[in-house]
Structures are given as C-alpha cells and as structure tokens.
Amino acid sequence: MKNYINGAMQKNWKNTPLTNKKGISAGRVFRILRRFSNTHILSLRRLIEDITGINRYQIQFSEKKIPLTAITRIIYRYLQILSGKPYAYVVKKKEFIDNYFFVNSRVLIPRPETEELIQNIISGGYINSLDRILDIGTGCGNIAVTIKSKYPGAEVHAWDKYSNVLNIAEKNAVHILGKNHGICFSKIDIIDFAKNDASWPCVFDVIISNPPYIGAGEFACLEKSVRNHEPRTALYGGVLGMDFYISIKNAVPRLLKHGGKLFLEIGHTQHTAVAGLFNFFESNCIILDSYSKKRFFFGLNYAGYA
C-alpha cells in the first residue's frame, strides 16, 4: 500500500514544483490525497487542519500555501491512517471533555461513553469539593485529571498496573493542571490488590473506574483498528469480561468508606451481572448512555459490607 501510494503521489505531483519554497496550496494537497480513499476523507480534513490550522471545511478550495515540511508530515501520517492506525494514535492526542490528552499505543483511546460517565457524575452533584477520590485503571489519566480540574480541592488518587502508562497519565496531569497537579499516581494492579487482601492507608469517598470489560467472544468481533492497535490489557476483561468488576467488588470493603459511592462504566450487556455483583449499596442504578444502552453503574451509599 505504501509503495503504491508513494508512486501514485509522485505521478500526481509530477508537474508540481516540489522545490518551490512557497509550498503547495492546501486545496491541491487535499484533492490529491483524497483520491486514495473515500472512507478517510474526514480524517484527512482533520489531519490537514491539525497540522496547518486551516479550517477543515475550507481546505478543499483553499489557496493557502502549505510548506513542504508540513506536506511531508501530512503524507506520512495519512499513510498511517490508511494502514488502519487509529487517528488519535497518529496525531498522539484525543479530546476528552474540556482538554486534549496525549495518547499512544500504550493507553486506551478515551471514548465518548467515558465522557458521558464523567458528565453524569458531575452534573448529578455526586462529588463534594473535598472528597477523596480513586480512579482505578487510570490509563492516560483522562478521568483523574478531569475530576481534579473540576474539583481542585479534592484528593485524587489514580492507580494503574503499568509504570509506562502512569508516566503518560502524569504527563497529561502536568500539561493540563501544571507541575503541582496534586494527583497521587500509584502503580497498583487491582486484581493483585484484591487477591492478596492488600490494604491501603486511607479509604475513599468515591471510586470511579472504566475497567477492561470486553469478553472473549466480543473481543474477536472488535473492529480491526481497535483489536490490532489498542492495548489488549486495557480492553480484555477475562472470558466473560467480568474479571475486573469481581476484583473491584472484593476490594471495596478495604477502599470505600461507609456511605461512599462507586461509579463504573460497563459493557451494555453486563448490567444485570454487575448490578447483582454490587448489591451491597443502599441505592444502585443503571444509567443509559446517549444511545439508550445500559452503560453505567452508579452505587450510592455503601452499606459497609460486600
């Protein structure tokens, strides 16, 4: 594919003065590149906008010159997109609520469903300004950083199993919140924590998690761009997709204070199993996402047992 595209580009640009220091018009770059795929035109528009700052809907007829160095970057990244690499990994960023987060193939790309989870928590007034909050499986830090940005007085902790993932989360915290971001990042595997009856020096008012919840059958049916590029460890939740929920359930008595709250993102077919697993809250409910899928579990007023 790469050799084919390179050859075709040379043909399309054979009459274009590539040594022209003024570059080539954005419209011409777009019109040439769009010939190679009808399914990636929106990504191409976004890519050119990201690199040049030209509005994506004005690119096609824009006469603004793009420097050759920028054209090289556009072509290189567009080849990655055409190969199936997710757009967020190509540009190394993903918007989540109010901020852009750095992402690479070590972390899951933040999803709109997780935005909805956090927006529901915030709009519902479930968090108090001085709460102690735990994000289990923080990934790129999108949950922990967003919560800390909304509740600067809260004590926010973020756990993940992998040091290289925590490095990315902390990088995002520093970029968005500043060097004194105040989030406590810890290398903790929730499955080991639950299995080994480990303890933690404090208990939390709120626990939030978007854990891996894809089961074996569903994993095989994921889109290739997800299955081939995003980290399996951030997706696969065991044969039934329930491994991490079971571990969180077993850890709750050691982590959540009496009267505390638990908020989980879940697979849309897992609502019955998850609600049954966390039946020790005085109030619990399943919340629908914007597609009317049963996507979130809210456990309120922890009764103090599991």
Image (tube, helix red, strand yellow):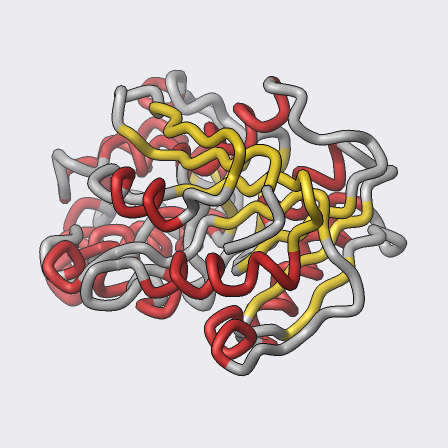
x 74%, y 44%: residue: 176
Most foreground residue, 306 or 146: 306
Q: Is residue 212 above or below residue 37?
A: below
Of all residues, the one furthest to the bottom in this rendering is: 196
Q: Is residue 57 above or below residue 243?
A: above
Quadrant the N terminus occupies: bottom left
Instruction: Tell me if residue 69 can be seen.
Output: no
As drawn, is 69 to the left or to the right of 204?
left
Q: Position of residue 228 (x, y in %)?
A: 22, 65
Q: Position of residue 251 (x, y in %)?
A: 55, 64
As drawn, is 105 to the left or to the right of 206?
left
Most foreground residue, 36 or 149: 149
Instruction: Tell me if residue 18 can be seen.
Output: yes
To which quarter of the image does residue 163 belong? bottom right
x 34%, y 20%: residue: 290
Q: Position of residue 226 (x, y in %)?
A: 25, 55
x 75%, y 41%: residue: 148
Q: Position of residue 127 (x, y in %)?
A: 70, 31
x 79%, y 40%: residue: 131
Give the tally of numbered discs: 0
As drawn, is 244 to the left or to the right of 160?
left
Most foreground residue, 256 or 180: 256
Most foreground residue, 7 or 56: 56
To which quarter of the image does residue 28 belong? top left
